[in-house]
Amino acid sequence: MVIFAMLGALMFCSKKVMEALPNIHLLGMFIMTFTVVFRVKALIPLYIYVFLDGLFGGFNVWWLPYLYIWAILWGVTMLLPRNMPKKAAMIVYPIVCALYGLSFGTIYAPAQALIYGFDFPQTVAWVVNGLPFDALHAAGNLMSGLLVVPRSELLLRLLKKREY
């Protein structure tokens, strides 16, 4: 449990450190890495991060989509082959991470529509208006997604060392 708490706190701290950069962070890389290593248990640090984000940022309407939005990347990662060849993983993980960043506004949009009472044209306008930020999100996620394979290998090695 302590490891998962530290990993969730690491996600939160990394997000805070990178807040000066719009929509560029390491969360996608962390979610994918933890999912590759811990599978279903990766939801523990993920929701520790979500809770910390709400605790420090305020449990407001912006936070409600966080209850589902990050779990989508976890779910997509769970659907990827578990024993993917390393060469394929080095390409697939960054692409999935980037596509998730590009689609972030679209995934967030249903909650916005429900919370603010948007109709379909307003929701589409909201998504289109956010595309430049989603493009930045995708670029940042592509770069951080390159770290999924090396970070997951490192984490697996560290976990094996602590076994007796």
Image (cartoon, grey):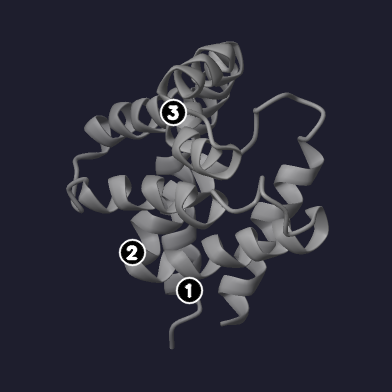
- Chain-order first, disc 2 or disc 3: 2
Label 1 to label 3, Cα distance in Å? 41 Å
Which one is in front, 34 or 164? 34
Q: Nearer the viewer, mark 2 or mark 3?
A: 3
Report the amino acid beneath label 1: Lys
Residue sitting at x 44%, y 83%: 163
**How would you rate the neighbour count of disc 1 (Cα within 10 Å): few for under 14, some for 14-19, many for 20 or more?**
few
Q: Is 154 situated above or below 42?
A: above
Q: Residue 123: where, in percent of width, then height?
A: 48, 24
The circle drawn on residue 161 is 1
Q: Which numbered disc, 1 or 3, marks the residue that appears first in the sequence?
A: 3
Place of residue 31 in the rendered image (x, y in percent of width and height, measured from the top left)? 48, 50
Crowd rating for badge 3 (residues with CA inside 10 Å; few <14, some 14–19, many 20+):
many
Residue 34 — which label?
none
- The residue at which mark 2 appears reads as 39
Residue 25, above or below 49: above
Residue 72 is situated, as x and y percent measured from the top left of the image, at 38, 47
Quadrant of the image occupied by residue 87: top left
The residues bearing labels 1 and 2 have C-alpha atoms spaced at a distance of 19 Å
Viewer-side residue, 45 vs 81: 45
Mark 2 crowd level (few <14, some 14–19, many ≥20, 10 Å Cα): some
Relative to 36, does residue 131 appear above or below in the rendering? above
Quick one: label 1 or label 2, which is nearer the N terminus?
2
Helix, strand or loop for disc 2 = helix
Residue 106, labelled with which disc?
A: 3
- Place of residue 152 in the rendered image (x, y in percent of width and height, measured from the top left): 43, 52
